Amino acid sequence: MASPAQRIASFDELYQAIRALPPGLTGEILEPGVIRTMGRPGGAHRLGARAILRSLGGDDAWEGGSGWWFEQEAEIRFLHDRLAVPDLSAWKLDAAQALPPAFVLENPITARPDWCCELLSESTKKSDRELKVPLYARAGVEWIWLVDPEAHSVEVIHAGGGSAETVDTIVGVVRRPIPPFSSVVDTSRWWVSAA
């Protein structure tokens, strides 16, 4: 006699379990029925994310820039009941859109971002590459950055039709726009080493 199929927990059940996690833990649903947890990012990771956001200020509509709304560590619900918490994410805004856009009041956000950025660490780089990049591409996120603070590099990925392709790799310090943004960024402050 065959054993009954194991029931996979629903998104709502998993999300309630994530909300019940102890302070300092973040949960994601990157695979059916599975919660992945991670601790809060370390200092170099947080400073790197802050430096990236500050360098993109010319594109940040909230800061008087042109056309983008940025979020840091926002919960985003993707296709097929997946929940991810990108280190950074952004949505392209049209000129008539109100600030802040209404979707930022949702938790989790259900509007698909146009850009997601993951800062790689030893504990997350495998899932960032193998689970998050394909998830973002399938969901229609057009641009993905994988920032490696150890290697001082940025892998710029363009996704179209569900597949993802690296279109640029930046190493070290540069002063130029990085797609999809028009701001000239200076990566010199992105590479913060632990003292």
Image (cartoon, rainbow, N blue to C red):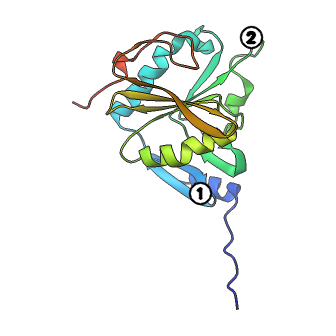
Residue occupying image coordinates x 65% and y 49%: 82
Q: Is residue 45 left or right of residue 195?
A: right
Residue at the bottom extreme? 1
Q: Amino acid at mark 1?
A: Ala
Residue occupying image coordinates x 78% and y 12%: 96
| Residue 169, placed above or below residue 32 | above
**x, y percentage for residue 38?**
45, 49
Q: Amino acid at mark 2?
A: Ala
Q: Quadrant of residue 100?
A: top right
Please state, as top left, top right, bottom left or bottom right, where the N terminus lies in the image. Answer: bottom right
Residue 91 in view: yes
Q: CA distance from mark 1 to mark 2?
A: 39 Å
* Residue receiving disc 1: 17
Residue at the right extreme? 96
- The nearer-to-camera label among 1 and 2 is 2
Q: Is residue 162 left or right of residue 89?
A: right
Q: Secondary structure at mark 2?
A: loop
